[in-house]
Image (tube, rainbow, N blue to C red):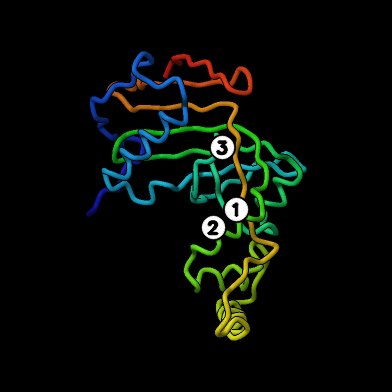
Amino acid sequence: MKSKTDISQIRFKYKTDSLDIKNTSNDPFVQFKKWLNEAIRNKVFEPTAMALSTLNSFKKVSNRIVLLKGIENKSFVFYTNLRSRKSNEIKLNKNVAAVFWWPQIGKQVRIEGSVSLVKNKEADQYFSTRSRKSQIGAWASDQSSIVKDRKTLFERFKIIEKRFENKDVKRPIFWSGYHIKPLLIEFWQGRENRLHDRIIYKKINKIKWKKYRLNP
């Protein structure tokens, strides 16, 4: 008879990589790009995936995975439907939190900050790089609203596909992106015996950051 797995005893042995405050960049974006490139080199699945948390008017937190699509003007950029739950919550409260987790290299980055919409030109440029079917999908999906079944969604997709037949698919006005302007960025490196390395950057003015080591 198979014994049940005791999830409380699942352990992951972290690599011996260390994170020393003296060896980290004074610019958290430089440090982030270094770690992101390491994740890409190590073939981490979806290295640009980040868990994004938002807050609604009842102070209830929701969370989902979105994909990082750029690091521009000292901000992290992602795109979404502006009628989605996350966008509606962002309209009410521009403060967000995000987390990147790269298990293959035992690293995590945590971000806290506020968001603002990207410029239309920037959104148009990114939308034009998406596959045609993804562009049509952006039109077809009324994101976060109830849909009867997958057949209904697919039928809507076919209608939109027909509408743009032999035409470029323009970006919907209800689809755009956000800049996350961080006020805090934490870099976490897994270590043995739960003595993990944590280096935190806090913004002290428009251009300067202060970094500290935290207890694990």
- Give the quadrant of the C terminus: top left
Residue 130 disc label: none
Q: Which residue is mark 3?
A: 73
Counting from the top left corner in percent of width and height, residue 175 is at: 65, 60
Counting from the top left corner in percent of width and height, residue 5 is at: 30, 45
Identify the residue at image location x=57%, y=85%. 165
Q: Secondary structure at mark 3?
A: loop
Q: Secondary structure at mark 2?
A: helix
The alpha-carbon separation of the residues under discs 3 and 2 comes to: 16 Å
Residue 126 disc label: 2
The alpha-carbon separation of the residues under discs 1 and 3 comes to: 12 Å
Counting from the top left corner in percent of width and height, residue 196 is at: 36, 22
> CB of mark 3 within 8 Å of CB of mark 2?
no
Q: Which residue is mark 1?
A: 122
Residue in the foreground of this view, choosing between 192 and 41: 41
Crowding at dot 3, Cα within 10 Å, few <14 / some 14-19 / many 20+, comes out as: few
Identify the residue at image location x=56%, y=20%. 202
Crowding at dot 2, Cα within 10 Å, few <14 / some 14-19 / many 20+, comes out as: some
Q: In the rendered structure, which amino acid carries the disc numbered 3?
A: Asn
Query: Mark 2 or mark 3, which is nearer the start of the sequence?
Result: 3
> CB of mark 1 within 8 Å of CB of mark 2?
yes
Q: Secondary structure at mark 1?
A: helix
Residue in the foreground of this view, choosing between 166 and 147: 166
Q: In the rendered image of this protein, does residue 19 appear above or below residue 13?
A: above
Identify the residue at image location x=45%, y=16%. 214
Counting from the top left corner in percent of width and height, residue 146 is at: 67, 68
